[in-house]
Amino acid sequence: MEVMAVAVNDTTDRIKRVFVRSLHLNLSAGDLEYEQKLDAVVGLDSLAVIEFVAALEKEFGITLEPELLRLDFVSDLPQLARYIEDRAARLPRSPV
């Protein structure tokens, strides 16, 4: 269970960096608290959500299902991190 918590924390940190970078915010990833809703930090319109999701998909090598492209889902950092962890775990691994 501890390994999963570490993985989710790493994923959360990566999501924060993608959020700040993709939306060109004048913040650092460290300015975002884990339990915080991302839309509480900055107002997100539909274009910002699309830019953020596209950056997440590129960062993690996943595709979010269209039905999840909702502000309430993509702005909930803990929920988003768990979803990405689950999706990433199902990706095929390349041989080492």
Image: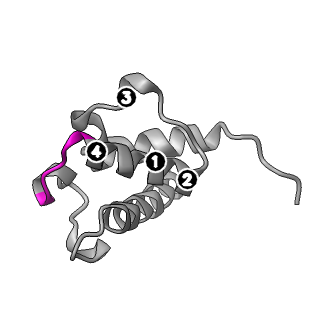
Which residue is denoted by mark 4 in the rendering? 47
Q: Amino acid at mark 2?
A: Lys
Dot 3 or dot 2, earlier in sequence: 2
Q: Position of residue 50 (x, y in %)?
A: 36, 43
Q: Nearer the viewer, residue 36 or 17?
A: 17
31, above or below 1, in the image: below
Is residue 44 rendered magenta in the image? yes
Dot 4 or dot 3, earlier in sequence: 4
Classify 10 Å Cα crowding around label 4: few (below 14), some (14-19), many (20 and above): few
Q: Amino acid at mark 3?
A: Leu
In the image, taking residue 84 as reference, residue 17 lies left or right, namely left
Which residue is denoted by mark 3 in the rendering? 68
Q: Position of residue 71 (x, y in %)?
A: 23, 37
Q: Amino acid at mark 4?
A: Leu
Which residue is denoted by mark 2 in the rendering? 58
Q: Amino acid at mark 1?
A: Ala
Circle 2 or circle 4, nearest the eye:
4
> What's the CA distance linking mark 3 and mark 2?
16 Å
In the image, taking residue 80 as reference, residue 64 lies left or right, namely right
Dot 2 or dot 4, earlier in sequence: 4
Instruction: Name the residue at the front extreme.
Output: 47
Please give the name of the residue rendered at 21% of the width and 53% of the height, measured from the top-left corner.
38
Q: Nearer the viewer, residue 53 or 11?
A: 53
Contact (CB < 8 A) between labels 1 and 4?
A: no
Classify 10 Å Cα crowding around label 2: few (below 14), some (14-19), many (20 and above): few
